[in-house]
Amino acid sequence: MTSNQSSEEQEALKKTASEAALQFIRDGDVVGLGTGSTVRYLLLALGERVKSGFRVQGVPTSKATAELARSLGIPLLPEEENWPIEVAIDGADQIDVNFSLIKGGGGALLREKIVAAAARRFIVIVDSGKCLSCLGHPMPVPVEVNRFGWRSTAQRIRELGWEGKIRKRNGEVFLTDGNHYILDVEIERIEDPAKVETQLNLIPGVVENGLFVGRTHTLIVGTANGVEIRRAP
Ligand code: 5RP
């Protein structure tokens, strides 16, 4: 959120971006459903469409999204399929000028990346406060790690020059849907996101990280002047 944007304004921008994304979903599509407060608005709007006869099948990227989608009557495909996803729609924590993302603020980055990779088109919905020239501080890169030897994995990350902090929620270590831990890794300026994404994923014990490079097809931004829809550069 930019300093001159209130949280009410930010919510309104998330909602407009989400509702604009509906135009990219066609009757009969298999749709990847992201995770987070922005995607929540998309699910609410999609649920309304489904009630009036629109046919979609969803692939949820988290238990939370699955639960909300089910409560709204959105049919879901089983977890273990090779899904024919036409379009996946998801939020992001930061997006840079080349449409590289930091994701995983909600801890769903692994399933989100699997679903984005399986989709023919990956659409990102954000409020304008998340668009930056360069990824990095103050948003850490979430790195999902196997619990086995996680302190050793943290040390390998430290050897690359970055400090990872174990994520906690309500005083307890946060567990992902895949039963892994998350290290939130502080990186000041991520000039080369593709390099950092690869460097992190090459460390044994790292399951996945929250840098999404070269995946975004379309960006939908809620701005104070309306919705902007941009194709990837
Ligand atoms: C969850 C994510 C979310 O898409 C990201 O954190 C954005 O969330 P929100 O829409 O609540 O700001 O990557 O893992």
Image (tube, rainbow, N blue to C red):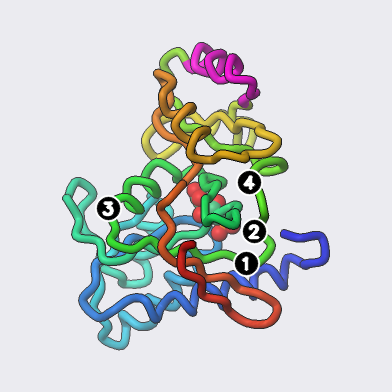
Q: Which residue is mark 4?
A: 135
Q: Is mark 2 within 8 Å of ligand 1?
A: yes
Residue 70, compared with residue 222, is above or below; it is above
Residue range (magenta): 150-164
Residue type of the residue flagged with mark 4: Leu
Q: Earlier in the sequence, mark 2 or mark 3?
A: 3
The furthest residue to the right: 4
Q: Residues within 10 Å of mark 4 (few under 14, many from 20)?
A: many
Circle 1: element type: strand
* Residue occupying image coordinates x 23% and y 78%: 55
Q: CA distance from mark 2 to mark 3?
A: 25 Å
Residue type of the residue flagged with mark 2: Lys
- Disc number placed over residue 130 in the picture, else none: 2
Q: CA distance from mark 1 to mark 3?
A: 25 Å
Q: Is mark 3 within 8 Å of ligand 1?
A: no
Indicate the position of residue 57 as horizontal and vertical percent values: 24, 67
In the image, is 231 to the left or to the right of 221? left
Q: Which residue is mark 3?
A: 118
Residues marked 1 and 3 touching at CB (< 8 Å): no
Front residue of this view, candidates 204 and 175? 204
Residue 88 in the magenta stretch? The answer is no
Q: Residues within 10 Å of mark 1 (few under 14, many from 20)?
A: many
Indicate the position of residue 35 as horizontal and vertical percent values: 46, 56
Q: Is mark 1 within 8 Å of ligand 1?
A: yes
Q: Which residue is mark 1?
A: 127
Q: Give the quarter of the image for residue 228.
A: bottom right
Kindly report which numbered mark, 4 or 2, lies closer to the viewer in this rendering.
4
